Amino acid sequence: MGRLPVITGFGGINAAGRSSGHHGYRRMVIDALPSAQVQATYHSLAALTGQLKKSDGKWTDGNSVEVNLDDYLAQLGPALEQGTLIRGLENNLFDPDLLPYLRNAALGPASDQPLEFTLRKKDLPTPLPAGWSVSDADLEGRVRVITVENFEVSLKCSRETAVHSAGQLPSGFDPTTLYSSRNHPRGLQLTVFAASDAINSMGIDWEIVKQNVAADQIAVYAGSGMGQLDYNGYGGMMQARLLGKKVTSKQLPLGYAEMPADFINAYVLGNLGTTGTNVAACATFLYNLRQGIRDIQSGSHRVVLVGTSEAPLVPEIFDGFGTMGALADDASLRQLDKLSKNDAPDFRRACRPFGYNAGFTLAESAQCVVLFDDELAMELGANIYGGVNDVFINADGFKKSIASPGLGNYISLAKAAAATKNIIGQEGLATRSYVQAHGTGTLQNRQTESHIINQIAATFGIHGWPVAAVKSYIGHSLASSSGDQIAASLGVWAEGIIPGILTVDKIADDVTHSSINFLLKHADVGKQGMDAVIINSKGFGGNNASASILAPHVVEKMLTKRHGEKAISKYKSLNETVAQDSQEYDASAMAGENRTIYKFDHNVLGSESIELSKGNLSVAGRTLEISLELENPYEDMCE
């Protein structure tokens, strides 16, 4: 029988905060939490953004001034809430009111008079434009130019962006302060944080994992959908010459879409196993997840880290999606709410899945999950946050527009529902499962995805299938969006509350919902009220993916049936220490301690570290050997 992929760690960062410890999830449902949990959420955000730290047993603020913890958090609370989730663009990445651009213009002489001007000799264009006459340089290195011909120049200008809302990381969070970032693109900075958070959340030292699993049985599948498009990546490489700057040696290599996996291997884990990424637009995380669970189910791998990182909040990407008419721009938001052009739009409600909406809201995020096979999870006493039943991927077939939806999502979602039914039964599917919809906030999505979910529900005899859409809180992080959905879903099993779609007052008339229930309020379902969640994702180009994720209490029942009561009892004993270490990591993060893992030039192995024999390969410092005795799947075809 296939091995069950168990989620043993998770971490990341998005507009709601840190993912591990369910802190980002709690920010979404903060208005439904008891006061102690509200205080803990503020505490996490304050530490994350550098406004709280514990030193010598005393709590201090961002200026190292001692504070009373409860009073300080109560004072900070409103600002912490305001500085999270979707909100007006802040200018820490770029100034949305002063976007620079170049306007081409033609200069030339007036009437019969030549045009005369001076400039530095080193700024002369090569070759000289036709008709230029240039004098010798003076003592200050300037030359006089006389021309009777017209010539083109580029004038530096600025403009205001049409979109002022985004799912930005919490105000004050700066990943560059957590490790030696060396001009890394922002997406890679977030990768280092997310992977570190996921590994630390496990409560098991990574070196223990490495000693219990052969090097070739560990995999990392992580990447981005857009690549690294800010100035330190592909963006700068493409812009530099036009801006009169030099291309750096790092911009091209650090821009690759699979670079998050490369960074995790080289600077976080020291991984020698399988690596790569599947690039599938907004469904990238689930494509990587499918790759990971197939490895575990087949037995070829025992540990897989799955992740994505996307940092698309750069002017050019706003321009691209805005020109497509895909984004909720300020003018459209005003029109939705019947505001005058002088009124400020409600940026907090910019994303309105399945309601009357104007487009999606760009966001940045990095998310990672750590998967063990069920046997390894038992052996090491790993935390069990959930299990991945299966992931299904389907294309759309022939298309008229590459960006328009098609039939593929009907297939992937139907299969995910069927796979869920296989585990928890018809009654479980109908009464103890729900859907985390892609829910982008666009007109096309509200019409097509609602019809898909509704038709699947009706087909499987489900009435009032609950549907959530967390992009209403944190925006659309493209490749990382389904990672955001999974992180939020794991939180539901910790607190028992499904986040409602609070940005929507009324479901739009063109939305199909005869068999489904769009949650416009938080739903208190209890920590064990839901046995499974279906994560749905739709990407440009016809990339559809749907995942069936199982609750931790369901996973425990499955493990008990497979391994027996005695093994489960032993597992629970081992897990006590692991759970305690996970809680210790969370407490250290809440105290402002930086545990970001970045091992540059650390324990670099050379050829002397490899020992080859006929049947196996050993690596210095690793207990288990890599077997070279491979099964031949084509044995019956060979002589």
Image (tube, helix red, strand yellow):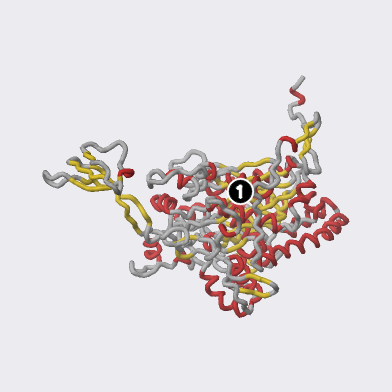
Q: Quadrant of residue 72?
A: bottom right
- Residue 422 relative to residue 375: left or right: left
Q: Please state which amino acid type lies under the numbered disc 1.
A: Leu
Q: Residue at x 80, y 53 (%)?
A: 380
Which of the two residues, 563 or 190, is positioned nearer the viewer here? Answer: 190
Q: Position of residue 7 (x, y in %)?
A: 70, 54
Which of the two residues, 253 or 257, is positioned nearer the viewer here? Answer: 253
Q: Is residue 10 visible?
A: yes
Q: Position of residue 368 (x, y in %)?
A: 64, 53
Quickly name the residue at label 1: 286
Q: Relative to 284, does residue 45 appear above or below in the rendering?
A: below
- Residue 593 relative to residue 510: left or right: right
**Number of marks in the rendered image:** 1
Q: Residue at x 74, y 50 (%)?
A: 372
Q: Relative to 47, does residue 104 appear above or below in the rendering?
A: above
Q: Is residue 413 visible?
A: no
Q: Position of residue 227 (x, y in %)?
A: 52, 46
SS for tag 1? helix
- Residue 118 relative to residue 331: left or right: left
- Residue placed farthest to the top in the image? 639
Q: Position of residue 625 (x, y in %)?
A: 80, 39
Which of the two residues, 359 or 412, is positioned nearer the viewer here? Answer: 359
